[in-house]
Amino acid sequence: MVLLGTSTALPKRLIERFKATDAGRLRAEYNRLVEGLAQRGNLPITDTWLANPVLSDDILKEAVPGNIRKAEHFLSVLRRLVQYLKGRLQVEHVETEVPVAFVASINGQAGIDQKMLKFCYDRLHSLMLTLEMTDTDEFLHIQTICNFATLVGTYTRGFSIIIEPFDERMPHIPDPVIQLCCHDASLAIKPVFDRFQSVIITSGTLSPIDLYPRLLNFHPVISRSFMMSLTRDCICPMVLTRGSDQLPVSTKFDMRSDPGVVRNYGRLLLEMVAAVPDGIVCFFVSYSYMDGIINSWNDMGILQDIMQHKLVFIETQDVVETTLALDNYRRACDCGRGAVFFSVARGKVAEGIDFDRHYGRLVIMFGVPFQYTLSRILIARLEYLRDTFQIKEGDFLTFDALRQAAQCVGRVIRSKADYGMMIFADKRYSRHDKRSKLPSWILSHLRDAHLNLSTDMALHIAREFLRRMAQPYDKAGSGQKKTLLTQEDLEKKFIRFLQSIIREETRCDLNYQLKNTLEGDFHHWLDLFNHFESFFEKYIKPRKDLQLVDEFLGADPPFPRNTVLQILRVTQSILENCSNKHLYSSYECPESDLELLDKLVKEHSVPYDLRFSLLTRLRFARAFSSLAARHQYVCIRLYAFIVLVQTSTEADDLTVFFNNEPEFIGELVSLLSHEAEVPERIRILGIVH
């Protein structure tokens, strides 16, 4: 709280300095706040929404309350808010309040109402911009207070305020904390649903899929779960329930400290590092459990035995240390030394780092990553979910734990050409109510023979799996069914889809062969356009109901509306996305007039005396695309020739000109000979010559 006092004192000094030197800037800010926060800057609408995705639109459009528009008044409000929070921290027992009660308490003791709290974040942001504060880290604490105040003032439900006087792990040391806990995930995604008409949520860990609509409070139009299409069984999940000594293994609170469990977990990892090449990733249920089991393995000598086969790297809560550990882990795998990476479920690595290819040939999930069930935050959230969405505590805890487990083990499979093993090392995974919560792409490869395994059985399965994966990889797979599709394969599948639609509605078969190489340019779709044209010529053009001839009513079969719409959509998409649609082919460069003339002379053996005439026609055709432009060009040339003859005093020069261009007039007029007729004015000009 001393830091918070410093954070409010510095802006006060800056305000006094600005009043003395540049009071106009503070006045301009005041006027801007009167107009409303939506006018405070030049950010596009999208950027403004992304900057405040959880704030209501009325906050941005509404004017800031009058009692915090002036900078000194706002700082006074912040000081009263800080003093109130300091007083609330002086408690001896845990207190839990809903936002409505907390705001009422602030209003009664500090004189700060809900509307003032709601605008704290944006008012501080505006003040810092006005005062040109560049060192934002110095004001991080007061920014946190303003964020807290804005959220408390904005939401009346879905949140709770929990005040804990000490950490339960060290109750003898006072460490008071005020926590604002969000229990309703639908609040975060609601602006997305409100802003966009179509929203697609996709992930490999959306299981069970029917629980997400309840948690996010929406009604899905389509809900589908798809299997992975693989050319081989490149995933090998296993459930290990006991060690080689047949003692059960689990991270249940009453078993996790058992020396037999710790020893069996260590023996499992030791056996695997000796058999599995490259990288192995291990996930633990918490940092404290990982630290404890690593110390126990070190005392038992297991850690030293593991390091005889692979190097060991550990994730810590320090970002820099974890980044360095990951970098060295990858280097060890790249050079062939092999490595083991110890990580934590719900940690930084589990949420966003991929261990594809040789970086992760095996992942071991030690235990079931349940949340700490005595946590005040978790208890409050479970109560909210039970009362609001009728979700049972056990269902949510199991769902959350198995989702985290799937998130961890899924780090090792990032493509269809990859392969890896997954070991769920806890006897609770053998129960159907737990195992069924795993994603279908894992359950489809989890055989009955891979359940309830011991360490030696898991080692045997791992060796057999690695032996199969060591064989040459055939992309076609069994039955020559491709799952790794090229651009050509995708385009062929798309064409076959269109053919099936046309056959379904017209019962005609428009078979054709695509080019061997499809580059995606416009001219590669010519076969498709030709078949579209054939379809229109055969089934659309002769329809009597379109030509309105003879007995047109009921004379034709039903109009193939869906097919025509599909063809038009495809045509539009191709035309919009082809970068070379103005050319026939991207491999054909625009030819010069002389290059085109040379090509025509060689192909058609054009006589020498006709080549100039052909060149003139080529230039004429390229330069003027419309009939009016061609008429205008010929008239201008003829007028220019008349002016030349009438004004020239050099008879000899004219004689030389006519000798070199004896057919000038006739050639010029003949340029229009292919038209329906030569206009009268041009014929008169030609006769005048």
Image (spheres, rainbow, N blue to C red):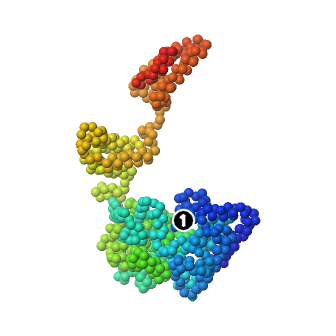
Badge 1 amino acid? Asp
**Is residue 683 depicted above or below 332 in this figure?**
above
Residue under the image location 52 percent in, 80 percent down: 97
- Tell which of 666 and 28 is nearer to you: 28
Q: Residue 429 falls in which quadrant of the image?
A: bottom left
Residue 166 seen in render: yes
Q: Is residue 433 left or right of residue 9?
A: left
Residue under the image location 63 percent in, 64 percent down: 33
Q: Secondary structure at mark 1?
A: helix
- Tell which of 574 and 359 is nearer to you: 574
- Tell which of 683 and 454 is nearer to you: 683
User: Percent from the top left, x then y, of residue 657?
Assistant: 54, 15
Would you name the residue on which mark 1 appears?
A: 58
Residue under the image location 40 percent in, 69 percent down: 213
User: Percent from the top left, x then y, of residue 639?
Assistant: 54, 20
Residue 268 seen in render: no
Q: Tell me if mark 1 has few (under 14), some (14-19) or many (20+) residues whose alpha carbon lies within 10 angstroms of its own.
A: few
Q: Is residue 163 left or right of residue 474?
A: right
**Is residue 425 depicted above or below 503 in this figure?**
below
